[in-house]
Image (cartoon, rainbow, N blue to C red):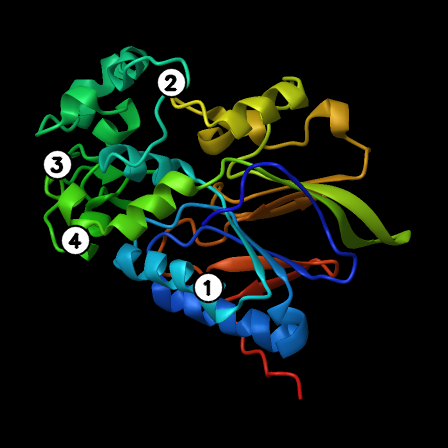
Amino acid sequence: MAETGGTSTGDGGRAVLCIGDIHGYVSKLRAVWSNLEALLGPESFATSLVIFLGDYCDRGPETREVIDFLLALPSRYPRQRHVFLCGNHDLAFAAFVGALPPPPDGSSFSATWAEYAQNEERERWFKGEGYEAMHVQGRRWGGDMGGRFNPKKGMAYKGSIYDAGPTFESYGVPHGSANLGKAVPDSHKKFLYDMVWVHEEDNVLIDSPEGRISCKLIAVHAGLQKLKAVEEQLKLLKSRDTSLPKVDQLSGRQDVWQIPEEISGKSTIVVSGHHGKIHIDGLRFIIDECGGLEQLPIAAIVFPSKTIVRDTDKIVAQC
């Protein structure tokens, strides 16, 4: 389903669309999708490369419907290319329902618990059926914050530290239920298993003060760490190393905000979601205006024009 986390050669005439975090809001997803089609026109839209930046689940009420929408895209738009990046919320969802790739070193998922052990009591990790063989992020995702207030979001937690309660409910089971694994269709589990952690695309056109230029594009949910070797990070991401308790490129904050020094100034676009805001600095693009909050829009960016499109826009279709 998702493209492999390798390098593709772009078509200079193809629009590239990067859609930010969706977080269970299918009506917003449908609206931003319609606005993108109206902006580009039927032909350009039908042949575009669409990169979803991850975080399809949690906070909003319609995760199941969101994944159904995404699964239908290849048949609805057979000439498009679709890339489904893994976000930190998606990794945790996959971990809970047994849809993570196994650790490449053969270790047990329980080996990931130690790094977060000091948080287990506060976050009330999942201890139901199957927890013994679960990645730490799955246990945290299925945990129970007891309705405590989340000052960062200005609202009570929705179930767990990940706000996973609405995802459970979208599949017809209560938050924290071990039956979620049975309720999630196999097609959805395959979608979660197949998500890529990074996508590279060559020959992506972008408008700049010097005119239209061709760049390499790297898409990853949170970003690349500034001070670590880029090739080392890309190798890790392509391997989808689930022996790691935490993947900084999917869940980091300030450490992944900027473009790594070694590729700064080298015509490389780095595009991400995750951070709950729109931020553009040179070739660094952060596209996540919604952040999973009901009152804020889902946003997308269109290359080469760098046009920002939101689900709340009123775009009239081209004639």
Tag 3–tag 2 contact (CB < 8 Å)? no
> In the rendering, at what x and y percent does residue 80 appear?
58, 63
Residue at coordinates 28% horizontally, 10% vertically from top-left? 114
> 165 or 85, which is in the foreground?
85
Question: Looking at the picture, which amino acid does disc 2 mark?
Answer: Ser
The residue pinned by badge 4 equals 169
Mark closest to the chain's N terminus, 4 or 3: 3
- CB-based contact (under 8 Å), mark 2 and mark 4: no
Rounded to the nearest angstrom, the CA distance separating label 1 from label 3 is 37 Å
Q: CA distance from mark 2 to mark 1?
A: 31 Å
The residue singled out by tag 1 in the image is: 73
Label 2 secondary element: loop
The alpha-carbon separation of the residues under discs 2 and 4 comes to 29 Å
Residue behind mark 2: 243
Q: Provide residue 183's location: percent of width, then percent of height.
A: 15, 50
In the picture as drawn, the residue positioned furthest to the bottom comes out as 319
**70 to 99, vertically: above or below:** below
Residue 22 visible somewhere in the drawing? yes
Give the residue type at disc 3. Gly
Looking at the image, do the residues carrying marks 1 and 3 touch, with CB atoms under 8 Å apart? no
Tell me the kind of residue under disc 1: Leu
Give how far across and how far down residue 302 sits, in percent: 65, 60
- Where does label 3 land, which residue? 146
